[in-house]
Image (cartoon, grey):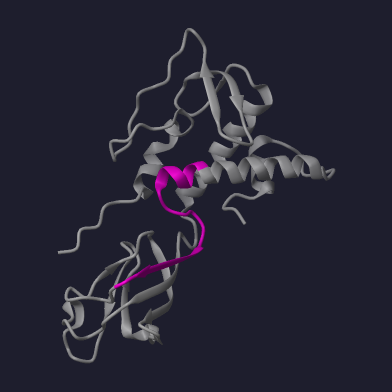
Amino acid sequence: MSAVTVDELKAKLGIPAEPPDPALDARLQSIIDETQALVEGYLGVPVEPTPLYMERGCGIDYAASVVLPVYPVISLDKVMIGNEEQALEDFWLDRADGMFYPADGCGCRRWGCCFCVPGPLQVDYTAGFDPVPADLHLALLNLSASYYQANAANVGQVLGGGDKVKQVTLFGAMSISFDATSAPSSASSTSGLEVPSFLQGWTWILDKYQVRTVVVE
């Protein structure tokens, strides 16, 4: 599955839905999948609901808070402490930051205590967006369209930031070279990282969803 459908991309590109063209549909789906993979790599989080797994040697210690490595978190699916499966209703989940902690019966609530839940800890959870936010979907759709158009023409197309592209290689590692009269932009994201040229025109949306550092006090 992908956040953008082939029919949505066809409509964006002005490609008629009829007659059916399985080869073109497969090509468009590859464009969509690769675009989404590039965006997810930049964001550091999955776009669609994605089952993930985390384990560590200790349980929920004195602070009684666990930060899952990928977020936002849609749901906790299974929590194992030692060899015992825990009741999911015994945990509170902060979906936005991927933090969960025991709403335990001893009354300590958010801060827990050293003997509440010894380890080791194993967690199955689902991360991503459900539904995908409208502005993030818009960015994926337009980036997919730009990706397709650049591949179709292969010369002088513009990817996002306004840099003229002389050659684009798709369906593998993305390769971009620039005209002698053009140079890559040096734009950076709100995280301070250099932004790939392909994404530069959409960082005003993408940066809002980039992974952040969570500090647990």
16 sits to left or right of 203: right
In the picture, the quarter occupied by the N terminus is: bottom right
In the picture, the quarter occupied by the C terminus is: bottom left
> Residue reaching furthest right?
19
Q: In the rendered structure, does residue 19 fall within the stretch colored magenta?
A: no
Magenta segment range? 38-57
Figure check: 136 above or below 195: below
Figure check: 96 above or below 213: below
Q: Residue at x 59, y 49 (%)?
A: 4
Viewer-closest of 25 and 176: 176
**Residue 164 spot, x, y in % from top left:** 52, 17
19 sits to left or right of 110: right
**Residue 3 spot, x, y in % from top left:** 57, 53
Viewer-closest of 187 and 17: 187
Viewer-closest of 189 and 137: 189
Viewer-closest of 21 and 77: 77
**Residue 137 spot, x, y in % from top left:** 51, 49
> Residue reaching furthest top?
181
Q: Residue at x 68, y 47 (%)?
A: 6
